[in-house]
Each structure stands twice: as C-alpha cells, then as structure tokens.
Image (cartoon, rainbow, N blue to C red):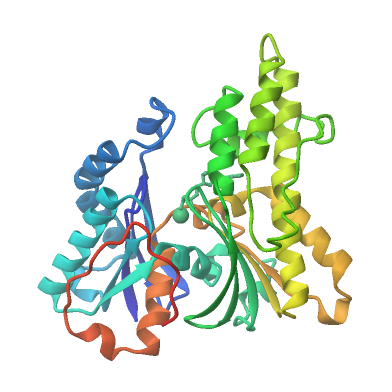
Amino acid sequence: MRILGIETSCDETSCAVVQNGREVLSNVIFSQVPLHRETGGVVPEVAAREHVVKIIPVLKEALKKAKLRLHDIDAVAVTYGPGLLSSLLIGVNAAMTLALVLKKPLIPVNHIEGHIYANLLSSAVSNQTSHAKRRIAFPAAVLTVSGGHNELLIWDAHGRYRFLGATLDDAAGEAFDKVARLLGLPYPGGPHIQKWAKEGNPSLYPLPRAWLPEHPWDFSFSGLKTAVLRLVQTQKKRSPKFVADSAASFQESVCEVLAAKLVNASKKYRVKEIHLAGGVSANSRLREWTADLIGKNFPDRVKPLLRYCEDITFCTDNAAMIAAAGFYKYEKTPSLYQKWRPITADPNLDVKNW
Ligand code: KG4
Ligand code: ZN
C-alpha cells in the first residue's frame, strides 16, 4: 500500500510517499528556516503563506521522485495537530481535496505519533544496524522531544499508549532554541548548540537539573533557561570560549535529565525497546547519554533495543513519518477511513488511543 503523507504543522512543507509503512519512496521537505531566521522564530502567518505557495510544488516533486502519478496513490495521510492552526489548515485542506477528487481513504495523523512512527521507517536506520530493522517488540518507552512537545510514554501496541509525563513549561527543543538565542546563535538553536558544545567543557558551569522528585516523569526547562540568562548577564561580551562552554554545560544538563527519566521509566515498566523521537532526538549527546545509561542499568540479557532515526532527516519534521503512522492506523481499522469525512485541525491535539 502506497500512502501519500502531508505535513505542514509548523515551518516545514513536506510531502512523501511511503510503501507499507516502512519503505520511503520519496520524502520532499521544503524548510522555511531561512525565512524565519530573520525573526529568530516562526511567525505563524508568514509560515502559513509560505505553505500555500509551496504545497503543490512539493507534492509534484514527491510524486516525481517516487516515479508515480497521483492516481497510483492508495491513501492520503495528513497531520491534523498539534501545531500552528494556520499552518495545519493548509495541509489538511490539501489532503481533503486530494482524497475527495481521487476517491481514496483519508487518514488524519497526530504529529507526535508521526515522530514516534518515524523510527519504523527502514530508511531511517543505516545498514549497519540491521537489528533496528526488526519488527518492534512492545512495550517500548518513548521520549518525544521537539520544539513544541516533550512527552514520556509507554507504547504498548499500535495505537495503544500510556501517558507518563510531559513538560511543565518549555519543550526541550524550545529550550535549545531560546538558549541559542541568548548565546547569539541562529534559529533553530539545537544543531548550533550541539556544534558549539563539541568545543566546550560541559562541566565548567554547574547548571541546574530539574529532577522534580514529586513528578518523576515530568520535565521542566524554564529554571535552566533562566540560569543561562544569568550566566550570560555576567559576561561583558560573549567570547567564543564562553559560548562553547555554556552551550556544552546547557546541553549536558538537558540530555542528562531526559535520558535518566527515560531509562528510569524503562526499568520500572520493564520495556523491550527504548525510543527517542522528534527533532531533539537528532542530538548526538542525548543518544550517547541514553545508550550509556541503558548499558549501566540493564544486564545484557534484558537490555532493551535503543531506536532512533540515524538519518536525522527523519528526526525533524517530515511527511514520511506521517505516511508511516497513517499506514498502521489504516491497517488496524480500514473501514474508519474509507468514507470521506472532513478533518478538523486541532492545534492542541493530544496523543489518543485508536
Ligand atoms: O520535531 P521538530 O522538527 O519540530 C517540532 O515538532 O517542533 O523539532 C524541531 C526542534 C527545534 O527546537 C530544534 O532546535 C531541535 O528540534 N533540534 C535539535 C537538534 N536538531 C534539531 N535539538 C538539539 N540538538 C539537535 N541536534
Ligand atoms: Zn515535529
């Protein structure tokens, strides 16, 4: 089954064709990052206008790369939340029109679930790690970390989730972006912080770690962000050494807490796999911390498989992950999606069971 995925929840216009939920035939992403760099973040109306301009060219390119015509598509899957309402509406409208005209099933997909299902795309992992191409063994502990969301879940089966916790303030990616701004680095901050951190000393500045003993599965990054602000205020100018050391110290604080909570939850719930998902899962230090804590906390015979998208194109927003999640939803209850129904975009959509 070949599903056309459409993703426009924030500042990436993306269309993809994915076969049977795993094989990526095409994944075209038009990033608006250069546009939003001028404002240091996404202005919703500017993003929506750009989606309108790019959605058809991106769709045509995705079909061309997959060597398919529109009529060869078996179903259309689209992100309907969470995200920026004005951006979501462009993708939802395009998907509803295509499904109606082509008379194909229309599958609404939660963006966060898209990030989770990205780990099941065979193109997301390299040839070396063939074990990661195995079928998923449930239950899995999943950390979703992006610019807009930060959740800890137990994934029991396709469409079955137990929600453990979330951020009480900023999402991890948002913290990376805000701290990058404080350090004078461009938007989006995550990749720049990671690059600068490689040159810095992660233990030079003892920044706080929000363990939240009363909320062991929740997260908080606002105190850390304020601590970096105070640190910046102590400097007359931001020297390259200062930027590198504070980027490294900040990154260490975020990654240690994220990885520790994920691994603690994995132990408590005796999971078979541990997954990192979303834009921040591209961070190499987060991957290292997680692998390290898995090694220290599990004997070899019960060590859960660590999954993340080795190809970072699939960590950040893309439509292939939406097509993948759409495939599993459709496979479970095809009858739900056969008849055309309007989709209501929901900027605050939660992960729900299906
Ligand atoms: O999943 P995503 O593309 O969009 C949302 O759904 O929000 O995530 C974007 C976020 C941004 O905040 C960006 O700074 C962060 O992911 N990010 C990273 C890295 N690459 C992207 N954060 C830390 N390290 C990275 N290497
Ligand atoms: Zn995302």
Point out the residue furthest to the left here. Answer: 101
Identify whether 22 is placed above or below 200. Answer: below
Where in the figure is residue 155, as x and y percent of width and height? 58, 77
Displayed quadrant of residue 305: bottom right
Residue at 25% x, 39% y is: 45
Q: Is residue 263 left or right of residue 118?
A: right
Please report the residue visible at 87 percent of the width from the left and 76 percent of the height from the top: 300
Res 196 seen here = no
Q: Nearer the viewer, residue 204 or 276?
A: 204
Q: Residue at x 50, y 47 (%)?
A: 147
* Corner quadrant of residue 294: bottom right
For this rendering, which residue is in front, 60 or 308?
308
Residue in the image at 70% along x and 40% along y: 251
**Is 23 on the left or on the right of 144, as rendered?**
left
* Closer to us: 299 or 237: 237
Residue 175 visible in image: yes
Residue 286, x across and y down, in percent: 70, 52
